[in-house]
Image (cartoon, helix red, strand yellow):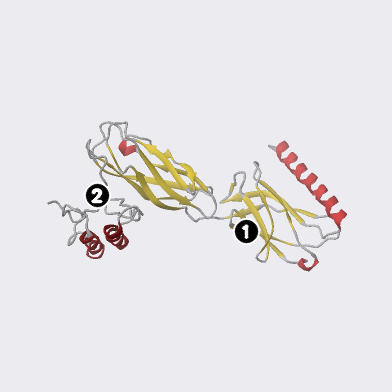
């Protein structure tokens, strides 16, 4: 460990010497150099996390943390910046430490400054979706589970609990682009028919986590898997609200592909999907299931 740190510091010093020569050659005010360890919530940050330096609101330098949790960056400036405060951001989170910028005519000023920050903002988890919302518990039919996860810093691990349908209680969801995390699952033979709320747990690199969102998957008898689920979430945003009633009404006017149904639109069980269903669903969101039960038995 000690030898690795020594070599890390040597590499930093070599970089500084090269920068000093370059600065002297062109006659500009050299940058102030800072280096040190970086921690977030008292833990070393992973490689690749960005450290940025500012004077006022102006970005003056940035770098990626190396594999040892060490940063090294130059903060640019000129004589008018003498005495100005340099603030640092770790992955977009303000660092507890700051420094003072000093103008020099030749050799860059190099200072060790370990940086730390506290981050307690949990990841945002939105758009839970099962692509194939209904499957048969035969161990073969699959559904692609998707969720969108964002964080003020960086998303860590995203998992989904599949234990109720015969899978892992912490199945890792992989990022497939655009902040979307996904995994494919089936339901083990013997899983009872019904609606399953599959809990997502999204963490960030600071250890914060959000486990408040479920992906709804329905296990149905064979022959029903092509049907839309009776959830009322017509627009597929994960909530049942007034917007779903409006969306359903618009579907009855404009149809597909402008408005795609994500749940069974016959919410009043009339046997057809029409404008009355949109009104019925909107009334449900206002007055509740006692007066407007979704999918009432006929």
The single residue placed furthest to the left in the displayed view is 298
Residue at the location (49% across, 56% down)?
Answer: 121
Measure the alpha-carbon separation of dots 2 and 1. Answer: 51 Å
- Viewer-proximal residue, 107 or 137? 137
Q: Is residue 164 left or right of residue 100?
A: left
Depicted 108 relative to depicted 15: above or below: below
* Percent coordinates x, y for residue 55 in the rendering: 69, 64
- First in sequence: mark 2 vs mark 1: 1
Element type at mark 1 = strand
- Viewer-proximal residue, 25 or 30? 25
Give me the disc on residue 18: none
Disc 1: which residue = 96
* Percent coordinates x, y for residue 193 in the rendering: 23, 39
Disc 2: which residue = 230
Q: Is residue 69 left or right of residue 161?
A: right
* Percent coordinates x, y for residue 105 in the rendering: 86, 60
**Residue 106's image quarter?**
bottom right
- Viewer-proximal residue, 292 or 256? 256
């Amino acid at each position: 460990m000690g030898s690795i740190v020594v070599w890390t510091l040597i590499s930093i010093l070599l970089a500084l010497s090269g920068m000093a020569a370059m600065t002297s050659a062109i006659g500009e005010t050299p940058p102030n150099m800072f280096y040190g360890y970086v921690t977030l919530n008292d833990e070393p940050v992973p490689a690749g996390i960005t450290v940025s330096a500012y004077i006022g609101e102006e970005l003056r330098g940035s770098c990626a943390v190396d594999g040892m949790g060490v940063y090294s960056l130059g903060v640019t400036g000129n004589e008018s910046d003498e005495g100005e405060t340099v603030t640092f951001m770790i992955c977009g989170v303000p660092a507890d430490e700051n420094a003072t910028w000093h103008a020099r005519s030749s050799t860059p000023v190099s200072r060790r400054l370990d940086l730390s920050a506290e981050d307690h903002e949990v990841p945002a988890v939105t758009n839970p979706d099962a692509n194939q919302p209904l499957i048969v518990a035969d161990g073969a039919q699959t559904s692609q589970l998707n969720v969108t996860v964002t964080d003020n810093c960086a998303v860590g691990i995203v998992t989904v609990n599949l234990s109720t349908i015969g899978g892992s209680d912490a199945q890792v969801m992989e990022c497939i682009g655009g902040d979307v995390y996904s995994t494919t699952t089936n339901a083990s033979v013997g899983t009872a028919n019904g609606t399953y709320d599959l809990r997502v747990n999204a963490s960030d690199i600071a250890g914060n986590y959000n486990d408040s969102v479920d992906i709804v998957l329905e296990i149905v008898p064979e022959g029903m898997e092509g049907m839309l689920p009776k959830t009322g979430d017509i627009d597929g945003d994960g909530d049942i609200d007034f917007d779903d009633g409006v969306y359903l009404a618009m579907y009855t006017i404009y149809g597909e592909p402008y408005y795609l149904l994500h749940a069974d639109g016959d919410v009043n069980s009339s046997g057809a999907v029409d404008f009355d269903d949109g009104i019925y669903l909107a009334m449900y969101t206002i007055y509740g299931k006692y007066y407007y039960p979704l999918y009432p038995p006929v």
